[in-house]
Image: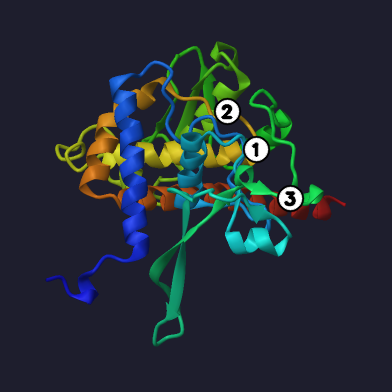
């Protein structure tokens, strides 16, 4: 008999359910690659809590993208029953949360007063499509998949990341670990603006893993991407690609652009399925590290902006 201490928590059970569904989606991609999209592809906006106004992040963002795709909701807006009731709205009768969950950590303080994550709790959320009597001020017009954000804003962001970028006629996009630069094919070789930006976001996320940045194992280890005997066996490469995929999706959602599927995504499906089956928590780890990479690039932009402001003040 399993003791209570060894019983999995509700959040652990829900995480396993979530990962199980995502594995099914990835397996569908292996079986029929044509037209297939990962849960994080195609997202134009971040999943948002309608009542609080906050975006869901990390694993919650990834999961709610998938839930939105799985249940066919037109927009990615969510809240709990209690939150919907607080604004006078009601979840439509007989609507179910199904696999619509979000996970929140709860914290404790150690002997030194430092906070640490002591566990997680899972809670149900309902999509705005499952709600009636919604006050007009909470109704947002969804963005069209063809509606691009201001490209100049994205270019300013990329310029503030402090990552060297080289363009050439070479058709591959990649992050050169040994030389610390991102290579991109010329813009005109891409079929769409979205394709170019989602690709460069992917490579910038890789670049955040360098030793002098976030020192992520998939990038910072001495043998790099291609030479270690145990590299593929340990699935480090597959996890790093998953981090870059998710991080690019987070950035695309932030700037309101359609995240196009990269052709090489299909190459990693079997590896992702393998590591998720072996260790479901990898999905949350990858989501967390992707969010950390995005926050690094955003904070770097703030540093560059402050430095530019200081320079202009000195000149004045």
2 or 1: tag closer to the N-terminus: 2
3 or 1: tag closer to the N-terminus: 3
Q: Nearer the viewer, residue 117 or 200?
A: 117
Picture residue at 63% right of the left edge, 46% below the top: 128
- Badge count: 3
Q: In this image, 98 relative to 48: left or right?
A: left
The local secondary structure at tag 2 comes to helix
Picture residue at 15% right of the left edge, 40% below the top: 230
Residue 57, x across and y down, in percent? 53, 52
Residues packed near mark 2 inside 10 Å, few (<14), some (14 to 19) or many (20 plus) = many
Residues packed near mark 1 inside 10 Å, few (<14), some (14 to 19) or many (20 plus) = some
Of the numbered discs in the image, which one, if any, rests on residue 255?
Answer: 1
Tell me if residue 224 can be seen.
Answer: no
From the image, state whether disc 2 or disc 3 is nearer to you: 3
Q: Quadrant of residue 238?
A: top left
Relative to 60, is 184 above or below? above
From the image, state whether disc 3 or disc 1 is nearer to you: 3
Q: Look at the numbered discs 2 and 1 and tell me whether their residues touch, using CB distance below 8 Å.
A: yes
Q: Residue furthest right?
A: 316
Tell me if residue 164 can be seen.
Answer: yes
Q: Pointer 3: what residue?
A: 134
Of the numbered discs in the image, which one, if any, rests on residue 197?
Answer: 2
Residue 88, x across and y down, in percent? 73, 59
Q: Residue furthest front?
A: 93
Q: For the residues marked 2 and 1, what is the alpha-carbon distance in whole angstroms?
A: 10 Å
Residues packed near mark 3 inside 10 Å, few (<14), some (14 to 19) or many (20 plus) = some
């Amino acid at each position: 008999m399993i003791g209570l201490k060894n019983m999995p928590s509700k959040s652990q059970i829900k995480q396993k359910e979530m990962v199980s569904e995502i594995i099914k989606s990835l397996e569908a991609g292996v079986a029929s690659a044509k037209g297939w999209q990962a849960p994080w592809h195609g997202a134009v906006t971040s999943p948002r809590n309608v009542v609080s106004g906050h975006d869901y992040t990390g694993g919650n963002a990834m999961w709610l993208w998938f839930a939105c795709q799985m249940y066919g909701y037109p927009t990615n807006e969510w809240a709990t029953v209690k939150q919907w009731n607080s604004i006078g709205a009601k979840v439509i009768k007989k609507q179910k949360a199904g696999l619509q969950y979000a996970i929140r950590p709860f914290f404790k303080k150690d002997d030194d007063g430092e906070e640490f994550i002591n566990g997680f709790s899972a809670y149900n959320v309902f999509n705005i499509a499952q709600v009636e009597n919604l006050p007009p001020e909470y109704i947002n017009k969804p963005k069209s998949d063809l509606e691009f954000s201001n490209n100049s804003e994205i270019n300013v962001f990329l310029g503030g990341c402090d990552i060297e970028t080289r363009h050439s006629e070479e058709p591959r996009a990649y992050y050169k670990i040994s030389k610390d630069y991102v290579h991109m094919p010329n813009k005109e070789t891409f079929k769409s603006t979205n394709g170019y930006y989602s690709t460069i976001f992917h490579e910038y996320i890789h670049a955040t893993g360098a030793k002098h940045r976030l020192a992520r194992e998939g990038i910072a280890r001495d043998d790099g991407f291609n030479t270690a005997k145990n590299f593929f066996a340990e699935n480090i490469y597959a996890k790093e690609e998953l981090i870059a995929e998710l991080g690019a999706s987070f950035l695309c959602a932030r700037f309101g652009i359609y995240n196009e599927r990269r052709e090489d995504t299909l190459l990693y499906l079997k590896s992702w399925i393998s590591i998720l089956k072996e260790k479901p928590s990898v999905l949350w780890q990858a989501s967390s590290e992707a969010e950390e990479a995005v926050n690094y690039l955003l904070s770097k932009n703030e540093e560059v902006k402050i430095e530019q402001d200081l320079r202009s003040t000195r000149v004045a």
